[in-house]
Image: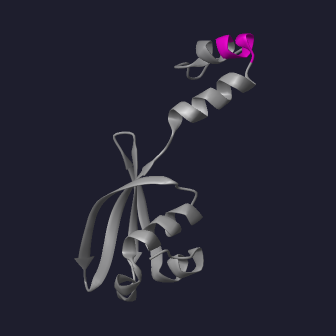
């Protein structure tokens, strides 16, 4: 069953998000009525509305009669790195590399 983004935003809600060990996690509340509408499809559509195309569902659990899911948002860092490499000149990349790790540098 394919869910629409409207159905997904009506049935799911972002409760929280957190970062740990360079991973980005989201906690999503799922309306109990969503069970009959295909939770996996709704979750995929909902995350797309947040700009997340790739994700891994880590856990699904019930808390105080609310169904929730924890998902790890996947990012394509290799793709974003390639975009920067195409935009920046060789000299700009050298300057950027020299500045990495410097804090409180003065001119």
Along the line of sight, which residue is nearer the eye, 99 or 7?
A: 7
Instruction: Give left or right: position of 93 versus 48.
Output: right
Question: Which x, y percent locates residue 95?
Answer: 68, 13
Region rendered in magenta = 89-94
Q: Where's the C terminus, which quadrant?
A: top right
Q: Position of residue 1 (x, y in %)?
A: 44, 77
Q: Residue at x 55, y 62 (%)?
A: 48
Magenta stretch containing residue 17, yes or no?
Answer: no
Magenta span dominant secondary structure: helix
Q: Is residue 81 above or below residue 72?
A: above
Q: Nearer the viewer, residue 23 or 102?
A: 23
Q: Residue at x 35, y 86 (%)?
A: 32
Q: Is residue 35 above or below residue 39?
A: below
Above or below — where is 103 with respect to 20? above
Which residue is depicted at the point 67% across and 16% down? 93
Is 92 one of the magenta-colored residues? yes
């Amino acid at each position: 069953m394919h869910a629409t983004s409207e159905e997904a935003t009506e049935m799911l809600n972002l409760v929280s998000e957190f970062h740990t060990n360079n991973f980005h996690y989201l906690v999503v509340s799922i309306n109990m009525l969503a069970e009959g509408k295909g939770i996996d499809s709704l979750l995929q559509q909902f995350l797309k509305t947040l700009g997340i195309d790739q994700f891994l569902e880590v856990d699904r659990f019930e808390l105080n009669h609310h169904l929730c899911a924890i998902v790890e948002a996947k990012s394509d860092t290799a793709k974003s790195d390639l975009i920067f490499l195409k935009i920046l000149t060789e000299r700009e990349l050298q300057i950027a590399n020299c500045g990495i790790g410097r804090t409180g540098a003065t001119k």
